[in-house]
Amino acid sequence: SRKELLPVLATLPVDPMLISLRMTDVAQQLGGQILSGAHGLQNHVHLEDVKVVTTKLWSWLRQVRTRPSRVVLERRNDYLRAFRDMVNGDPFGALSVKNAVKLMRDVGVGDPNAAKFDVDAVDIPDVVTGKKSEPGSLSKEQILMYAAKRMDLDHDGIITVRDVEDFVPSIVVVSAADRVDIVAGMLLSDIAASVGQASLSGIILTGGYQRSEEVRVLLADLEPALLRSGMPMPPVIVVEQDTFATVNQLSGIKPRITPQNFRKIQRARQMFDDFSNKKAITQAVGASTVSADMSPKKFLHNFIEKARQSQRRIVLPEGDEPRMIQAADYVLKMQTAQITLLGDLKEIEGLAKKLQVDLSRATIIDPATNTELRQKYADAFFEKRKSKGMTKEGAWDQVLDVNYFGTMMVSCGDADGMVSGSVHTTADTVRPALQIIKTKPGINIVSSVFFMALEKEVLVYGDCAINPNPTSEELAQIAITSADTAEAFGIHPRIAMLSYQTGSPKESDAVVAKVAKATELVKKLAPNLEVTGPIQYDAAYDAAVAKKKDIGDDKVAGRANVFIFPDLSSGNNTYKAVQQSSGSLAMGPLLQGLNKPVNDLSRGATVLDIANTIAMTACLVK
């Protein structure tokens, strides 16, 4: 019989991040007990980097200095920049292993004065024969070739930009639990310190908890001292099996994607977007399964994709905040925006190294030392505020504040948007924007919205963060700007002006009257918008409830997706109640009404919250 050929739905390449393990996977699947360094359990592990150390510790440690991972790590950022230049900035660009090695030589990876590297321990296979080298020396060419092959995880002879980005060398040492000398040597020797946190992912001690008493005493003394010195303690795990059984069991450990591992989840989503045949998938599942409303998955996909395509420049004034640095690294890897961090260059680079993140594609500006930009922004700020009594000296001092400096970058066109507030108050973020960027024509207040990602749909709540008790005129402006924001993210707005009472009876209190007047103003100012009010939440959301209340021929009742609250108390409490009780994702607050996008973060914002806000800010740029 005639066979029907099925379309190719996706061709997904091997991805280093997705196949990598973490020390937490090792600890859980080996059934090990954590002796110290629990905070380092998220360290990456590649099984080929697991090393068994029994004797000759010092010769092995000396050889660590010449391992390919160490040689490349020293010049990784320079190599990554050169690699991107070689492929003309293409995020999916690639080089052959041979050309990758040539580029290493050009960049200066490894000691340029050394033709050979002395080794005492045998750990690096010969690139020609595949056999392990004899003690003596290795040529620089062998070291570089092995390093390139180490990056080529799918063994296809091609190294991509992503392979270089994800090349974070690591060592996991397996040793007997009573070998206190090995643990001390790895943690305290000058060579181990030079390897640093990027290479020592963890230590696995074999033979059982009872044999590790001396090690436990050592770790109790060492961990506080290492933390004070700024070097995080690598996790030390003890298992009951002997060394041989442990190594065999390690080979069977599988990488996993857990709900908490948002980097792997987002990478998987990105790979699906990049390599799947969306047209074939849509035809396979059928168009009838697509909802007319915006689903949470579609919403997330749309704004991430829009941000990727637009490549807007977003400035982060709080550049010395660890969460902002991690979010910047995440955004750059996801390619959802170009990032500028404000702060002391050395401090930011030091934090980036400590956090093991890559900021090579970010721009870092120190307002205190960049006098040229500071003078440019001070002059522009003075012109904007001189009618309010601002002096040139005062403007010079004022733009040293990172939020004012960042806002001036947006105002002068050196950035497209700004995200701040992880350590600053809302007032610290909004005040410069009101003074410098100002509100849109016809809008005289800044308001906010939250995007509430429920199980099957995305709703818009406003204003839940800024205005305590808006007037009818202000409420109408909030409704109109919220509709604009919804449309910017692909949501067709159907606006419900909320009140505790549905309809406008003749006898109503001031709150209901305020909402009724605001509804009429929206209809007058923006006649193209679908709006209803005053209306209660249940009647606005549920068609069955709306029918029972006999609202009549109302196109919004029971179908609303933009909910405007009469005051901050009701709005703020409602979004938090929905978020906490249903487990919904609340994205925001996003500020609206300004001429250019500036957004404020919650001071409890997570790295993922910040990264999403940056991407959403990029989408708001006109």
Image (cartoon, rainbow, N blue to C red):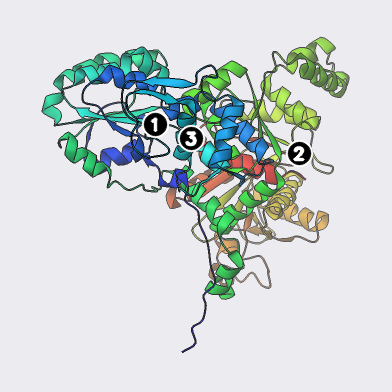
The answer to whether residue 568 shows anywhere in this view is no
User: Which mark lies nearer to you, 3 or 2?
Assistant: 3
Q: Please tell me whether mark 2 sits on a helix, a strand or a loop.
A: loop
Residue linked to disc 2: 594
Identify the mark at residue 170; answer none if there is no mark.
Answer: 1
Rate crowding at label 2 as few (under 14), some (14 to 19) or many (20 or more) other CA atoms within 10 Å.
many
In the displayed structure, does residue 29 sit left or right of residue 89? left
Label 3, label 2: how far apart the Cα atoms are: 54 Å
State how many labels appear: 3
Identify the mark at residue 162; answer none if there is no mark.
Answer: none
Label 3, label 1: how far apart the Cα atoms are: 18 Å
* Nearer to us in this view, 123 or 258: 123
Say whether disc 2 or disc 1 marks the residue closer to the N-terminus. Answer: 1
Residue sitting at 39 percent across and 16 percent down? 193
Q: Please tell me whether mark 1 sits on a helix, a strand or a loop.
A: loop
Using the image, determine if residue 544 lies above or below residue 621: below
The answer to whether residue 615 shows anywhere in this view is yes
Residue sitting at 87 percent across and 21 percent down? 383
Say whether disc 3 or disc 2 marks the residue closer to the N-terminus. Answer: 3
Three-letter amino acid code of the residue under disc 3 = Met
Identify the mark at residue 145; answer none if there is no mark.
Answer: 3
Label 2, label 1: how far apart the Cα atoms are: 47 Å
Three-letter amino acid code of the residue under disc 2 = Leu
Residue 515, given in percent of the width and then of the height, sits at: 69, 52
